[in-house]
């Protein structure tokens, strides 16, 4: 049996996330208490009470999701509800940091500060250069690339998230995103604009990537004790920490190859566990392989 733990990314957040875990499990509460101390803000309050518009801000959402995922993992571990032998970890975008933490690459405080900085840099890059993202449904990689090329008009517009078969998110300058949505409609392709702050996983995030590179250069990382899949390559990270840092920087401006990662993991003996918050990754997994076995830890009720 191969056991995989999946860690959600930005977009999975919702007001109230993690509160049931913190109320019912001391191990989860301890995670939020430490997060509050490390950041000097009441991160738990944003998770438990909102308001929604603040929780959805990139600079708050990213550390909030990181903490919530780890709180659910801590509670599940204390309740002996996790696989005893994890084959590997995979995380969607921000979730790659959760995966690296669980694999022993850095401690909780280091990871939390990194994702807080990452979120702030991405938020500031989004404000300085307005951009957006649009999900194309029912297209393959070649079709998405062709639509982006035709709609770009000399501006940045690229595929940014290969989520699952028939769902590719594209990212770029706002006028180009608008043209893409219009062109997709003309081509009978369903296009859904996403409620995001900017053009994530595109070259417009280069200022954020540069600043994150400076932060990562100052951090000591350990090699993963358990394999962790990299978003950029859809391959497990190696032992070289310099390469891990390089891939984390690239991840800010390059596409997330989630579908390709999951396609390499699914099989007759594969079992998946999705950490809180939400069920986004469970949904994407089923679109890759309907037969896949998934345990979702989106709520404390899942632990019984």
Image (tube, rainbow, N blue to C red):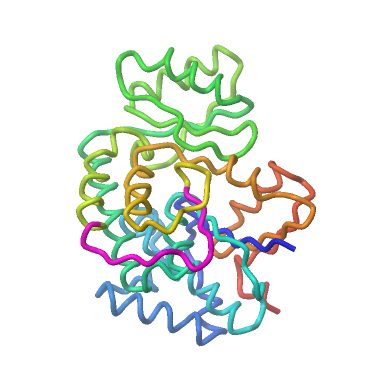
**The C terminus lies in quadrant:** bottom right
Residue 126 falls in which quadrant of the image? top left
31 in relation to 86, above or below: below
In the picture, measured across the screen, residue 10 lies left or right of residue 165, that is left
277 or 158: nearer the viewer: 158
Tell how many labels: 0
Question: Residue at horizontal 67%, vertical 63%?
Answer: 3
**The N terminus lies in quadrant:** bottom right
Question: Residue at horizontal 55%, vertical 73%?
Answer: 73
284 in relation to 118, above or below: above
> For the magenta stretch, what is the residue range?
217-230
In the picture, measured across the screen, residue 62 lies left or right of residue 207, that is right
Residue 20 falls in which quadrant of the image? bottom right
Residue 170 seen by the camera: yes
Residue 49 seen by the camera: no
In the picture, measured across the screen, residue 79 lies left or right of residue 108, that is right
Does the stretch in magenta take in 252? no
């Amino acid at each position: 049996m191969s056991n995989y733990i999946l860690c959600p990314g930005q977009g999975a957040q919702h007001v109230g996330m993690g509160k049931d875990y913190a109320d019912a499990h001391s191990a989860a509460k301890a995670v939020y208490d430490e997060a509050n101390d490390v950041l000097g803000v009441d991160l738990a309050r944003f998770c438990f009470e909102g308001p929604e518009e603040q929780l959805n801000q990139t600079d708050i959402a990213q550390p909030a999701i990181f903490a919530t995922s780890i709180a659910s993992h801590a509670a599940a571990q204390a309740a002996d509800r996790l696989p005893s032998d994890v084959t590997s970890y995979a995380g969607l975008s921000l979730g790659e940091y959760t995966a690296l933490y669980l694999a022993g690459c850095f401690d909780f405080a280091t990871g939390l500060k990194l994702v807080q900085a990452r979120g702030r840099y991405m938020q500031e890059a989004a404000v300085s250069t307005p951009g957006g993202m649009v999900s194309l449904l029912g297209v393959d990689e070649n079709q998405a690339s062709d639509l982006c090329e035709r709609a770009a008009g000399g501006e940045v517009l690229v595929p940014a998230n290969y989520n699952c078969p028939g769902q590719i998110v594209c990212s770029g300058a706002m006028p180009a995103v608008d043209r893409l949505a219009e062109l997709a409609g003309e081509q009978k392709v369903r296009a859904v604009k996403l409620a995001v702050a900017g053009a994530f996983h595109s070259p417009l995030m280069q200022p954020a990537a540069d600043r994150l590179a400076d932060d990562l250069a100052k951090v000591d990382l350990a090699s993963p004790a358990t394999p962790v899949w990299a978003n950029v390559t859809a391959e497990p990270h190696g032992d070289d920490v310099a390469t891990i840092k390089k891939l984390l920087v690239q991840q800010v401006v390059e596409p997330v190859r989630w579908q390709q990662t999951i396609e390499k993991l699914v099989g007759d003996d594969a079992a998946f566990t999705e950490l809180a918050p939400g069920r986004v990754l469970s949904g994407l997994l089923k679109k890759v392989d309907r037969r896949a076995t998934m345990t979702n830890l989106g709520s404390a009720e899942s632990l019984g």
